[in-house]
Amino acid sequence: MISVQAWSDAQLLWDFQQMGHEPRPCSVAIGLGSHDLGVADTTVDLYHRGMAPLVLFTGATSRTTRERMPRGEAEHYRERAIELGVPASVILVEPTAKNTGENIRFSRSLLDERQVPVSSVLLVSKPYEERRAYATACKLWPDVDWVSASTPMPLRHYADALADPRLVIDMLVGAHQRLTTYARQGLLVEQDIPAEIEAACRRLRDAGFTSRLAPEAV
């Protein structure tokens, strides 16, 4: 049973992860691979709304996606997009990235290889990782304009959809932890984190929501 306090703290982290960007037309939409097909669906919706003429899906597999997406996250996203009416001709697939940094670097390399001019990118990620994805992208590819997006969904609905509320809170705590530890390692742009957000994360860690923390911080 998840306490009222834990839900309240999780909501704070969820809201903080949302960048609040208004989608606008960009050179390309990049969908970051994961267990969540909602990333593909949101990327498709943005394409159909005229927000990008080209879609790039990036991602190999991980321990959470090997069984569900045996052909690779990016390939399953591509198949989903085609099912939803996106022409195959406007979809690029980067099938080897295994983390967010590689998602950005390998996507950039693929676009360079295809000689696609890029001045702005619509970056589509899971709702609880918007800020981390954005901060990573700004660090690794600073000379483009990044617009962050994710599936618009309340925390409770997202937890219900995954049928594992505790795991969702664990992932929120892990995403927040990486904002600070990865910034110290120079892997992403440092974020200004309010004290109330740090306190909420500490309370959740003390309550045992730690399964998705990076190993060195467990």
Image (cartoon, grey):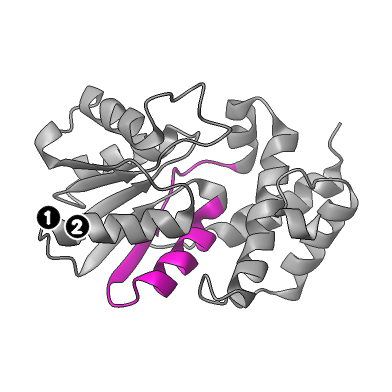
Label 2, label 1: how many angstroms apart (C-alpha)? 5 Å
Q: Position of residue 156 (x, y in %)?
A: 65, 37
The answer to whether residue 211 is above or below residue 194 is: above
Q: Nearer the viewer, residue 108 or 172?
A: 108
Q: How many other residues sit within 10 Å of disc 1, few (<14), some (14-19) or many (≥20)? A: few
In terms of image quadrants, where is residue 119?
bottom left
Residue on which the image places disc 2: 111
* Amino acid on which disc 1 is placed: Arg
Which of the numbered marks, if any, corresponds to residue 46?
A: none
- Which residue is rendered at x = 22% and y = 54% of the image? 110
Q: Nearer the viewer, residue 47 or 72?
A: 72
Left or right of 6: which side holds 187? left
Q: Is residue 193 magenta?
A: no
Residue 154 can be seen in this image: yes
Look at the numbered disc 1 and give the secondary structure of its residue: loop
Query: Image check: 47 left or right of 202?
Result: left
- Residue 2 in which image quadrant: top right
The amino acid on which the numbered mark 2 sits, given as a three-letter code, is Leu
Residue 188 appears at what percent x and percent y?
51, 71
Residue 143 at what x, y percent from top left?
A: 28, 77
Magenta region: which residues?
129-154
Q: Which residue is mark 1?
A: 114
Q: Quick one: 103 or 21, which is closer to the camera? A: 103
